[in-house]
Image (cartoon, rainbow, N blue to C red):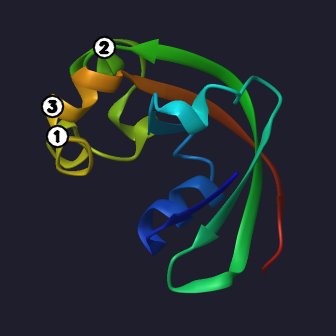
């Protein structure tokens, strides 16, 4: 699975502070499981990429519940920032997945 993140979030994953990525629990995520690999690309430079492995996946009904398990630092966004990405009505309709990641490889210096 390929995802694109802005430079700040990309750097947070690269330096190890952002260890959790949030996704809507939509159909395309139904087959995603622990051990699967994600290719994370820097939005401003698609050539910059980090490969990460899904270490754990937890399901949540509300965005606020994620912050009871994971720190804001691990998520890389405040609750208010995350709610701009996933409005409450959308998150509640689908549910959300918190994917704890481990960096496998970067392809840039």
Q: Residue at x 73, y 24 (%)?
A: 33
Of 109 and 104, the residue lying toward us: 104
Percent position of residue 84, x then y = 17, 50
Q: Quadrant of the C terminus?
A: bottom right
Does residue 63 appear in the picture of this structure?
A: no
Please give the residue where the numbered disc 1 appears in the rendered image: 87
Mark 1: secondary structure: loop
Please give the residue where the numbered disc 3 appears in the rendered image: 88
* Label 1, residues with CA under 10 Å away: few <14, some 14-19, many ≥20: few
Q: Residue at x 25, y 23 (%)?
A: 93
**Where is residue 92, by image quadrant?**
top left
Whether residues under marks 1 and 3 lie with C-beta atoms below 8 angstroms apart, the answer is: yes
Please give the residue where the numbered disc 2 appears in the rendered image: 61
Q: Residue at x 76, y 23 (%)?
A: 34
Outermost front residue: 27
Q: Residue at x 63, y 69 (%)?
A: 41
Q: Is residue 109 above or below residue 69?
A: below
Could you tell me how far apart the alpha carbons at marks 1 and 3 are, in whole angstroms?
4 Å
Q: Is residue 5 left or right of residue 79?
A: right
* Label 3, residues with CA under 10 Å away: few <14, some 14-19, many ≥20: some
* Label 2, residues with CA under 10 Å away: few <14, some 14-19, many ≥20: some
Could you tell me how far apart the alpha carbons at marks 2 and 1 are, in whole angstroms?
12 Å
Percent position of residue 100, x then y = 61, 29
Mark 2: secondary structure: loop
Percent position of residue 102, x then y = 74, 39
Q: Is residue 40 left or right of residue 55?
A: left
Which comes sooner in the sequence, label 3 or label 2? 2
Q: Is residue 108 left or right of residue 29?
A: right
Of 92 and 5, the residue lying toward us: 92
Percent position of residue 42, x then y = 57, 74
């Amino acid at each position: 699975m390929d995802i694109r993140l802005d430079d700040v979030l990309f750097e947070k994953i690269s330096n190890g502070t952002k260890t959790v990525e949030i996704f809507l629990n939509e159909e395309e995520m139904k087959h995603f499981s622990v051990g699967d690999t994600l290719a994370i690309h820097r939005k401003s430079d698609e050539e910059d990429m980090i490969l990460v492995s899904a270490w754990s996946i937890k399901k949540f009904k509300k965005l606020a519940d994620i912050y009871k398990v994971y720190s804001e630092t691990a998520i890389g966004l405040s609750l208010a920032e995350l709610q701009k990405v996933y409005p409450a009505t959308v998150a509640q309709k689908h549910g959300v997945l918190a994917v704890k990641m481990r960096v496998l490889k970067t392809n840039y210096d």
